[in-house]
Amino acid sequence: MKRNFIPFLLTLFLSPTIIFSQIGPGGIGNSSDNLVWLDANRLSLPDNSAISSWTDFSGNNNHAIQATSSRQPLFKTSLINGISAVDFDGSNDFLQFSSHITTDHTSVFTVHQSQSTAINGVLTLQKHFIYSISNAVGVSYTSPNKYYTFPFSQNDPTIFQFHTDNSFTGGLLEYGRANSARRDNSTITRTALLSNSISTVGTLVNSSGSPIRFQNGEISEIIIFNRRLNSAERNIISAYLGSKFSVNTLNTYYSHISTHNFEVFGIGQESDGANTNAQGTGIVEISNASTLGNGDYLLIGHDNGGLSTTTSVGSAYASNRFNQTWRADVTNTPGTIDIKFFLTGNNFAVDPANDYRLLIDNTTGAFDNSSISQSLIGTYNAIDETITFTGVALTDGDYITLAVRPNVITAVGDGAWNTPATWSCTCVPTSTDNVVIPSPRVVDVDGATATAEGLTIDAGATLNFNSNDSLLLNGDLLVNGSISSSTGLLGFVGTGAQELWNNSGSAITQFDFYANNSTTVSFKSGDWNITNFIKVAAGQLVNDGATVTLVSDASTQAQIQPSATNSFSGEFILQRYFSARAANYADITAPVVSTTIADWDAELFMSGVGGNDGDARDGAGGPIYYSVTKYNNTTKAYIYITSTAETIVAGEGVELFLGDNLSTFAAQTMDHRGTPYTGPISITLKPGFNLIANPYSCFINYSSVTKPSGVSNQFYVYVQNNGAYQLFTGGFIAAHQGFWVNNTSGSDKVITFNESNKFPLAISLISKQKKEKKFALAISSLGNGFGNELSVMPSSTAENGLDTEDEYYLASPHKAATSLITKASESNVELIGSSINSMDNAHHLPISFLAGENGSYTIEAEDVAELLAVYNCALLEDKEVGKIIDLSSEATYTFAANTGKYDRFELHLFKSAEDCIDLLNKASESNPSSNGVSILKRGQIVELNYAVEEAQQAQVDIYNLNGQKVATTQYIGIDGNGSKELDFTTELNGIHLIVVRTNNEVITEKFNF
């Protein structure tokens, strides 16, 4: 007996809710007062189907019927502003209601469009009918003279309505129409009623009950109530119809028809009544407005996204949600409301009583971590499968949807991630678990790789990476607290789109960052600094609203490891640090898809580009100095950059002068802004030297790059300290680095860089490779330190003239540059590395000397043993002073020179000892006294010896090895033969240079004091 009694009570209890729930159009009425509701858009019929019965959706089963096939109208899809309709032919088509509609107090709504200018019947009831005539639509309540019309355009969808009470005389009849152009309303006093014998659709009826004046047009919806609706109810149904049929003139109380125009319903109140509970035809009901007053409305429509679910939702708030979203239009102050979802057939929670959440998005409707403003818990009724959320505050334009909470594990104590006691589950989170670290908890990623679905770090909470540890996420990351990265790796390895939100207000600094997601991993908000490596193994790493910086400083150069092609989207900041140095040139690029010179204008002084710093000039009133240039690889000419709008693309070298003034450059970090370049890139190399660049934000191993014929493994990098291009054979080229390659083929060649050429190095040097051991003469200015190296390489395969082992000379852009240069035999090509045949008994290499400034210079022989393994002696001849230096015993030679280029030196290599001795003896005989002046040191005493024919002044200066004068200049009179001791007022310690200048020569000697 008890088993029967409980269902009886439930039926008794639930029946009033079912009967009186407002499920009519727009959430107005139900089967008790909504007599008829014909809606063609809800008919599941093929296009052009004959209509024998138009279903009544009011619940009263008063269908509109036509049994005669020749008089049946046709069903048409997408006819009235994209909505289905029933098409009447204007000849004999009509439908008759199965039950005559006799109410004298009523509210009626129709949606139709007429094709004919004749009188067209739309709807006939016992006491009223609606018709259209030429460009007008009207209502009649008595015959023959009481016809009231509004103008309208033919073929223009029209929503017509009229409302009247039950008074036979003296009653009001309100009527109105709306179409795409205008909206009209009027009120008249009714004096009598019709007495039609049948109720029809698509025709009028004569006194004998026969159909006349057939409709030539389409009817999409008819709504009939058995009472006169109040103003609020009429406004809500008007909004429902206006949204559905895109008639904007009716959208006074609902303005979101472009995106959420389906099943609009709502509550509202005016002085003549209210609608306080509404559901309409959907699964959502709203009720119980806390402060509903006159003029207050709250209407809701949806986007027809469907009641399937999606995981496209902020993982901090939910694991999945309805695809369908609803949007609210709030007029004035209705207050908070209750929202109920009817879930029968659409229940998607595993534990409905605990899992469901109402999500409110007050921004975009994306329902991501940044746009969700509220996540509310409701009360679930397992009997009727509803979830109710009470006291919900909606603002105008809010989006809502129903979601299931994330699978959440919460940190309950400070400790290691992989310690079960740290977590509320007394377990270790897995890749399917959403994790929350609340304040003030501190969780350490320490040891084995940590995993989770999504992670939320609340304000006041901290996630620590203790060392080289990893955290891999399959979902989103929401940071309101802090992350201490150490040398840890943060990875995103999900299968759906993942998002990173930094809402902490502070930058998050991460050591390593890894993405392996075939869709997208997106930075959505806040500042993110990557200090070591980024790798995108699959998919795209997107910046969509955040600031993401690959950091470069004195100790760090963040790099992008080998990644998928086109693996970045959006703007990233790729930094390049330049240390403090003397002002000088640099070859660089922007390793992004494309940017402009303006990108560098905020950090660097640039002249001639029309930027922030104005123009420097070569002397007062002189020409503009252009500090930024490109190199035309075809014409072999520099091109001045004259605008900050000049584009730079990955792989394109730019040469610029780094200087805060003409002498110094303070340490500075340059920002390159754009989409990082990834994937292969091909660059055309013209014959001769080409300025190109490393296109990636990562070191590359140039030895691994496949070169075309005529392009060797050599490349040149400008070294600021030397003021010269340094030649490297293979090895590494730094991120952002411009460099030069020489195409000796005589024709265009193409070189291609690939992700596989990347070679990430945890250093911030401009280049890094082991120096090849070979003999070289290294020259250096004692004034500015500039210089280069000239290499000599014995080889049994070397040929006369140019061969593949020769190293070409590339002139420095700096005016004060210093160089030693040779030429191959039978060639005018200048070299800084000469390959000589080791089978020959002797070689005599002419060496040109380029002096960038007046002053003293030092030549130092490096790795002389490499030559002496082949030759008996290596002698450097200074032809200007007639001096020969035996490099086997004297590896350093210091001399003075004025600015210019001189054919001053020659390197002699002999296998025969006798040849070596002969050359040394000849030099001694031809220049016994160094042209009459010499400097001799005995102990701490330095003497000036001289033998001159005319009296003159000798100027004596003393310099340290940095080129700084350390003593007052002495002037000593010399005449004939003699010797004078030099008087030093400053105590000297270490190696110093003594420079003597006479009328005829400059003599430099280096002594250790």
Image (spheres, rainbow, N blue to C red):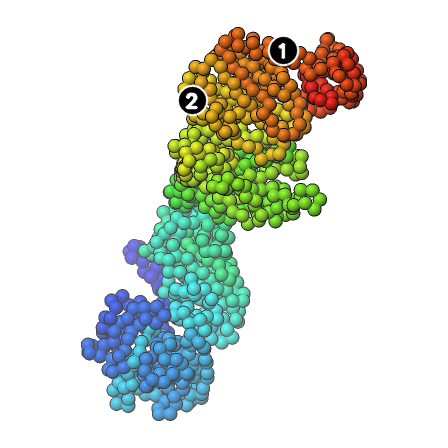
**Which amino acid does the dot numbered 1 rest on?**
Ser
Q: Which residue is mark 2?
A: 799
Across and down, in percent, residue 979 comes to 77, 11
Does residue 6 lie above or below 263 as drawn?
Answer: above
Q: Quadrant of the C terminus?
A: top right
Does residue 555 lie above or below 678 as drawn?
Answer: above
Q: Residue furthest bottom?
A: 144
Mark identifier at residue 924: 1
Across and down, in percent, residue 363 comes to 50, 56
**Which quadrant of the structure image shows residue 13?**
bottom left
Q: Which is more toward the observer, 545 or 720?
A: 720
Neighbourhood count class around disc 1 (C-alpha, 10 Å): few under 14, some 14–19, many 20 upward? some
Q: Quadrant of the N terminus?
A: bottom left
**Which amino acid does the dot numbered 2 rest on?**
Glu
Q: Secondary structure at mark 2?
A: loop
Across and down, in percent, residue 982 comes to 77, 15
Q: Secondary structure at mark 1?
A: helix
Q: Which is more toward the observer, 112 or 357?
A: 112
Does residue 672 lie above or below 445 as drawn?
Answer: below
- Residue at figure coordinates x 51%, y 48% from the top left: 545
